Amino acid sequence: MERQSALVLTIIFFIIFVIIAYYGAQITFWSSIILAIFLCLILLNIFYPPSNLTTDDADFTLILYAIFEILGLFLLGIYIIFATFSDSRQSFCENLTF
């Protein structure tokens, strides 16, 4: 598949995944965007594997492809860090009342 077609399909699937996750599964908006980014990064790498970058000519879609890959991984990392630090367990000592 060509890089242009892969990018267009990825954007279409991103919009569909956000709508399904937000309205269908009742996930919060930020989490539905992150889920859609995760799924679309997988699809983008299936539609147009990074190994194809070495054989194709460089053009504007290569910049878009790189932006999607880097920004997607960056946002996933930020969300994972945020979710990790906001997820806390209660201490045993806090539950004791005298």
Image (cartoon, grey):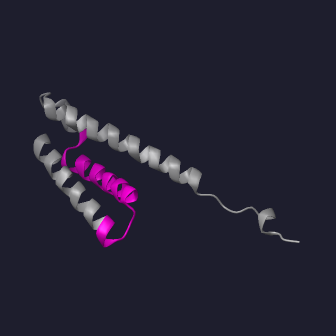
- Residue 48 on image: x %, y %: 19, 44
Above or below residue 73? Residue 96 is below
Magenta part of the chain: 22-50
Query: Does the magenta-highlighted stretch encompass residue 39?
Result: yes
- Of 86 and 57, which appears nearest the observer? 86
- Residue 37 on image: x %, y %: 32, 51
Q: Can residue 2 be seen in this view?
A: no
- Residue 35 on image: x %, y %: 36, 57
Q: Is residue 66 visible?
A: yes
Above or below residue 75? Residue 23 is below
- Which residue is depicted at the point 40% across and 58% down? 31
The quarter of the picture where the C terminus appears is bottom right
Above or below residue 5? Residue 33 is below
- Which residue is depicted at the point 36% across and 70% down? 26
- Of 95 and 50, which appears nearest the observer? 95
| Extreme residue toward the right, this view | 98
- Residue 45 on image: x %, y %: 25, 47
